[in-house]
Image: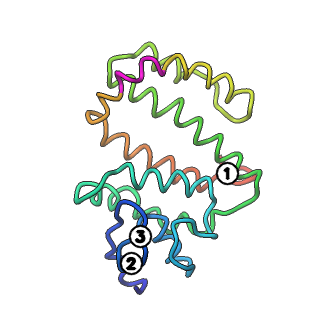
Amino acid sequence: MTTENLMNLTLTHGSHDTPEDGMCLMEAVAFMAGEPHTDEPECACPVIAAYARNLNDQMGEGAEGDALRAKHLAPLATKLVGTRSTPEVERKRAFYFADRAVRLFAPSALEAAGLTEEAETLRSLPEIGDEQTAEAAGTAAVYASYAASAAYAARAASAAATWAQAAQVLSEACEIALEGGE
């Protein structure tokens, strides 16, 4: 597969044995970096890659999922190349993803289910940036999770906004560096 073909590539669900079988987002990143076919390329931060693989597959299978990946993930593929960094930067990125899960995604799902008080509780938590704030957020999130089962049913209603937010979080995580990148 050539770089020219990559521009017309449909990102698909799951991992693939060869590029000819298809590519998920991270397999496309490996291709762009000139690495062997894998969904765990050496050039990418493992924290970002784990989020990207999950996001790729959560968008579903078939034409609808492929369209979501084309819209939200394909434009980010080149940004993921070269994101591997130090353990300290990986740690910052992990806290960033935890923060976005607790203070952005969970409240959106809760609000979609009409659970505005629970959503506001999570949204008003301090930013998760270390073990202490992560522990405090985890406790609050446990209580909100009791209401989250109702929010799951509302997922489809807010899916379009959620995919855009999820892709934006992925893009922002690529900018996190040891100095200044928040």
- Amino acid type at circle 1 is Gly
Residue 150 colored magenta? Answer: yes
Pointer 2 residue: 6
The quarter of the picture where residue 159 lies is: top left
Given the current orientation, which residue lies at the most extreme front position? 17
Helix, strand, or loop for circle 3? loop
Cβ–Cβ under 8 Å for marks 2 and 1: no
The residue at the point 58 percent across, 42 percent down is 97
Vertical relation: 97 (above or below) 28? above
Horizontal side, residue 129 vs residue 27: left or right? right
Pointer 3 residue: 16
- First in sequence: mark 2 vs mark 1: 2
> Which stretch appears magenta?
145-151
- First in sequence: mark 3 vs mark 2: 2
Pointer 1 residue: 181
The residue at the point 55 percent across, 79 percent down is 36
Mark pair 3, 2: CA separation:
15 Å
Give the x, y percent position of residue 81. 57, 69
Vertical relation: 10 (above or below) 121? below
- Amino acid type at circle 2 is Leu
